[in-house]
Amino acid sequence: MSQRPPHFLPYQGSKRLLAPQILAALGDRRFRRIYEPFAGSGAVTLAAAHRSLADAFVLGDSLRSLADLWRQVLTDPAVLAQGYERLWHAQELDRDGHFLSIRAEFNQSANPAALLYLLARCAKNAPRFNQSGAFNQAEDRRRRGVHPARLTPQLMQVAALLQGRCEVRDGDFADQLRDAGPDDLAYLDPPYEGTSVGRDRRYHQGLNRERLVAELQHLIDRKVPFLLSYDGRTGDRRYGEPLPERLGLRRLELHAGRSSQATLAGRVEWTVESLYVSGGM
């Protein structure tokens, strides 16, 4: 077995590099199911599956088109890879208009291969969707996206790792967790308070802090163990305030390295993310 879990989505904010620190909070505990309802790139699920930390996994996202992309990864990765390869090679025929054409196509059809291409080519690897789920990020003109010869085996490895033991859901995160119990684990990575309210809205759906706290209390009342990545800081700038002490959560600080956003702006800043661990773990 490879020393590193497979991955295929180049996603800004992905927890791929932080996954070992996140899973270290679990000690040697193993679970019936691990839920990741804010899946994105599914980095924590893939790392947990790679280490066989659960019998089964539930991946989900409020964005249905992203959930559908995951469904095709698990059910027909070869067709997805072929669709991506066709779009990737076609960009050589129309370097100026191809990305915008595929973006328009995806916003009409929600085609998973089109979404995969947009994720690979979008600016700063930072996908942006409006509130109706339409992709609205610009392209990165400095690069062409992951070459199909590299992406195809990554898709196959992800599919092989999760096939037969992973369910994909979409919709509200609390609904996705409706059947979680004390033998399961929920890993929650919602939009940070400082990036989903006010003028800086990067996600098609934000999450109200009061709603998050209420749902965390519901998990606690049901004795569902969870890990939560929520607030953090970059340099002197904080993203949200610590969660209420009454929840009884243990707060760890994970060093996430240099801020990519600050680097792009010509600054050197370091990012620290908070990981909240529910009681009993």
Image (cartoon, helix red, strand yellow):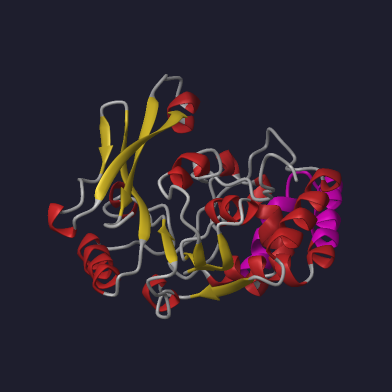
Rendering quarter of residue 157: bottom right
Magenta-colored stretch includes residue 174: no
Q: Toward the viewer: 35 or 26?
A: 26
Q: Toward the viewer: 25 or 242?
A: 25
Please report the bounds of the magenta region as a residue range. 81-107
Q: Is residue 80 visible?
A: yes
173 relative to 69 in the view: left or right = left
Instruction: Work out whether 254 lies above or below 120.
Output: above
Q: Toward the viewer: 213 or 57?
A: 57
219 relative to 10 in the view: left or right = left
3 relative to 202 in the view: left or right = right
Question: Residue 176: image x %, image y %?
Answer: 45, 75
Return the residue found at the far front. Answer: 28
**Residue depicted at x 79% and y 64%:** 77
Rendering quarter of residue 271: top left
> Which secondary structure dominates the residues rendered in magenta?
helix
Rendering quarter of residue 217: bottom left
Question: Residue 59: image x %, image y %?
Answer: 55, 66
**Residue depicted at x 52% and y 41%:** 20
Question: Residue 267: image x %, image y %?
Answer: 42, 20
Q: Is residue 101 visible?
A: no
**Residue depicted at x 86% and y 49%:** 89
Return the residue found at the far left. Answer: 246
Magenta-colored stretch includes residue 84: yes
Image quadrant in which the C terminus is located: bottom left
236 relative to 87 in the view: left or right = left
**Residue depicted at x 20% and y 52%:** 243
Question: Residue 61: image x %, image y %?
Answer: 50, 67
